[in-house]
Structure formats: structure tokens, C-alpha cells
Amino acid sequence: GRLGAPRRHRRSQLPGELGNPDLAVTPAATRSSELPLLAGATTPIQVADRIDALLFAGEMPDADKMALITYLRPSGTATVPSSTQVRDAVGLALASPAFQWH
């Protein structure tokens, strides 16, 4: 017989996006404006400002913010940044030298 419960895919064990149920992206929440962490931000500038406020307390360097705004430009016929773009932008902000506290 088998001991223990069957293994699950690691992703299925996370309660929500990034392991935080408050940031969960449901199938209905496909546009970035529907991501709870954005608090209604829909334009690239608003999203970058929200990331700045959440992660940098408003102290993100201008060059880093401009890079995020450029990255967050909607592609194709989209009118708002995609949820993937927003997640990636958060990752880029976290990886930026300005966020590293050494």
C-alpha cells in the first residue's frame, strides 16, 4: 500500500496568486484592473504608481518607474495592461537594485 497522501502539483497548493489569497486571480479576473492589489489602477502610469506605493513607499527612482510604465503598455487591441504584465512588473520592481536592501 501507499503511505501518505498523493503528491499534488506545487502550484495547486498555493491558496492564491503569489501564495497570498488576497492577490488571487480568478478566471473572471483577466484584466489587470480586476487584480485586488491594484486598487482600481488601469493605466500603465497608475499601475506603476501603485507598485511604487506598495513596494517603495513612493521612493521608486524615476528611471525604474519609467521602465515599468514602458513595460506595462497594453499590447494589441488591449486597453489595459494584462494580469501577466502586472505580475511581471511587480517581479521587475522586486528585482530592481533600488529594492535591494543591503
Image (cartoon, grey):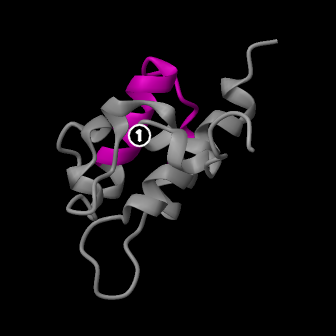
Instruction: Say which of 14 and 48 sits in front.
Output: 14
> What predominant SS class does the magenta segment belong to?
helix
Residue 86 shown left or right of residue 50 in the figure: right
Q: Secondary structure at mark 1?
A: loop
The residue located at (25%, 39%) in the rendering is 36
Is there any visible trace of residue 42 in the rendered image?
Answer: no
Q: Residue at x 43, y 30 (%)?
A: 20
Quick check: 10 left or right of 12?
right
- Based on the picture, tell me whether residue 54 belongs to the magenta stretch: yes
x and y percentages locating residue 102 in the rendered image: 82, 12
Residue 82 shown left or right of residue 28 in the figure: right
Residue pictured at 63% horizontal, 34% vertical: 94
Q: Is residue 71 magenta?
A: no
Name the residue tied to disc 1: 16
Residue 51 can be seen in this image: yes
Q: Position of residue 55 (x, y in %)?
A: 49, 25
| Residue type beneath disc 1 | Gly
Q: Residue furthest bottom?
A: 76
Residue under the point 35% across and 64% down: 81
Q: Which residues are magenta?
A: 46-65
